[in-house]
Amino acid sequence: MSEAKISRDDLEGKFREVKTGIDERTGPAKSAVVPAAVAGGILVLLLMYLLGRRVGVKKSAIVEIRRI
């Protein structure tokens, strides 16, 4: 067996080739996922706000002052 040395340029070239292939596949999907993720995040925050408000109203203390 002959030992072939792998140079830094060989590694960089292969990584660049793999990255280009991945970017070609994920490029169109990213443009559709980002707005959906933002909308989902806003929806979750709004839902948490509304549920928190409801719980706060249900458990708020009622203070009754009586004169003796």
Image: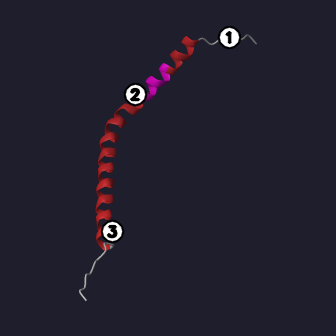
Asked whether 28 falls inside the magenta stretch, the response is no
Q: Does 63 sit left or right of 17 as displayed?
A: left
Mark 2 residue element: helix
Residue at the location (28% across, 62% down)? Answer: 50
Disc 2: CA contacts within 10 A as few (<14), some (14-19) or many (>=20): few
**Mark 3 or mark 1, which is nearer the start of the sequence?**
1
Give x and y (percent) for residue 58: 31, 73
Marks 1 and 3 sit apart, C-alpha to C-alpha, by: 68 Å
Disc 3: CA contacts within 10 A as few (<14), some (14-19) or many (>=20): few
Which marked residue is nearer to the observer: mark 2 or mark 3? 3
Give x and y (percent) for residue 25: 41, 31
Whether residue 21 is situated above or below residue 28 in the rendered picture: above
Quadrant for residue 10, please give it: top right
Mark 1 residue element: loop
Classify the position of the N terminus by image quarter.
top right
- From the viewer's side, name the closer residue of 51 and 56: 56
| Residue picked out by circle 2 | 24
Q: Where does the magenta region start and end?
A: 16-22
| Residue picked out by circle 3 | 55
Give x and y (percent) for residue 38: 31, 45
| Residue picked out by circle 1 | 4
